[in-house]
Image (cartoon, coloured by chain):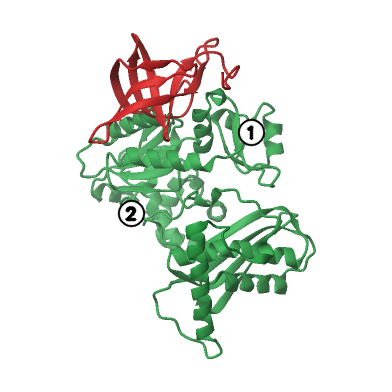
Chain colours: A red, B green
Amino acid sequence: MRDGDKMARKVYVEVILKTDREGKNRPLSILWEDGTRYEVDRLLDVRRAASLKVGGGGMRYVIMIRGQQCRLFEEDGRWFVEADGPEDGERGES
Amino acid sequence: MCDLAEYLPEQLPERSILHSDMNSFYASVEAMLDPKLRGKAVAVCGSQETRHGIVLAKSQKAKKAGVKTGMAVWEARQCCPDLIVVPPQYDAYIKYSKLAHEIYLRYTDQMEPFGMDECWLDLTGTGRDPVQTADEIRETVKSELGLTVSIGVSFNKIFAKLGSDMKKPDAVTVITRQNFRSLVWPLAASEILYCGRATTRRLARYGVLTIGDIAATPPELLQDWLGINGLALWRYAAGLDCSRVMTDGWEAPVKSIGHGVTCVSDLLNDGEVWHVMLELAQEVGHRLRSQDFLAGGVQLTLRDNGLLFTQYQAKREAATRSAMEIAQDCFRLFRENYRWETPVRAICVRAVRLVSSREPQQLGIFDDAARREKQDRLEAAIDDIRRRYGKRAVYNACLMGDIKVHEIGASEVTMPGMMYV
């Protein structure tokens, strides 16, 4: 990793989506692992991309949540975000 | 010396061919999926427990430490003590290979895959600048898939492929009509496509050591030494290859259909060998049926536990796609030839002399065509049940239990076939 002490981890999340008539998805909110639901304020960019921070990739949605930019990926039907935090440590259910 | 090679490439119509090669493909996919592996010496290896323990692919760092594809895992660890060994994830490799193809198809529909990780693209007539496009593809693959490619840009498929091998990883090499003599000709003869070990050895006997040497040898002489392949090799070396890049969806013509396995433990008697052959023949029969072929012969390849290869082949009276008949033919070959001096380690059953199942077949006077047709209908029904309910929905009772075969899931992986010429 580039930042020795700041390891990122892959956090799978529940997402509420709106799919339009063309089949385009727009994430409306995400459910974080601690049970908090975050509304998506803005969608800034959508494209296929690899996640260099946590590995894997897919369709990448760059979104704004409470003034912070967040990268949300759809990978084989599952959704994950790149989260800063301890590596492996308590990766299980909390 | 042959002066044809001096001026002919310039006379051929201008073409823009790209060859894209995904660098250390399996190992790169692993490192992309798990960032902890990045920049480390990584080798993708088959399972040691099921005796597939050889290096299938290695990262750049492992390569620098001397790890080679095909090495046993213990050997690789000797070369590189901090080697990280990971098992293959074929599903992921197939997925990323397809995603790369999708990127290529944005630029041209003339895309000819060569195995899972290589592809030729023809940009002729698209109005795109080939070098700029190559750079764009390289960047797109990196940002969208997190993988790197090396791309060769040239005026024919052979030099484009050669170019993709010249600078690695993540690079573009351009071989033009003007610079190919200085760039390509000094390279060893073995660098050119289809100049394998045996051909290289033969050429070396005549003092032909470089690609330039091949181009400078009269083609008639090469034909004398190597047959029709000698002529092709001369054309390739002289920059005169004009083979087409096939459109997406084209598949190399099938010459044989085989299925092989390295057994979990050595096979010690005829009974065990029969079970493995029958199991392998199921897949061969299924693929013959799904691709509308009949086998006019069978080929059996064996490897004993001293790793010695032996191969036997037999022609059939009547062409077949019956798994049972293919297995029986192979077993007959085995019984007639194998002396059991050592146990058997690996078996490959192969259907050869393929003919289309739609072609009329000559009936034999001693062959019971009605019985054969009945057997074919039975096997078609079994095939249909397996298609609907899974491979293990119905199978021979004798194949129940441990038959020393372990499925490795590699059968979906596309190996490089023949280039379209």
Tell me the chain of label 1. B
Q: Which residue type does callout 2 highlight?
A: Ser
Tell which of B196 and B392 is nearer to you.
B392
Q: Name the residue rendered at 46%, 43% in the picture.
A: B94
- The quadrant of the picture occupied by the C terminus of chain B is bottom left
Label 1 sits on residue? B85
Position in image of residue B112 (x %, y %): 36, 49
Q: Which residue type does callout 1 highlight?
A: Val
Tell which of B170 and B157 is nearer to you.
B170
Position in image of residue B291 (x %, y %): 43, 64
Side of B418 relative to B127 (left or right): right
Nearer the N terminus, badge 1 or badge 2?
1
Q: Name the residue rendered at 58%, 32% in the picture.
A: B63
Measure how far apart labels 1 and 2 are at the Cα level.
40 Å
Tell me the chain of label 2. B
Circle 1 sits in a helix, a strand or a loop, which is it? strand
Tell which of B111 and B408 is nearer to you.
B408
Label 2 sits on residue? B243
Q: Name the residue rendered at 33%, 33% in the picture.
A: B137
Q: Is residue B225 visible?
A: no
Position in image of residue B217 (x %, y %): 43, 54
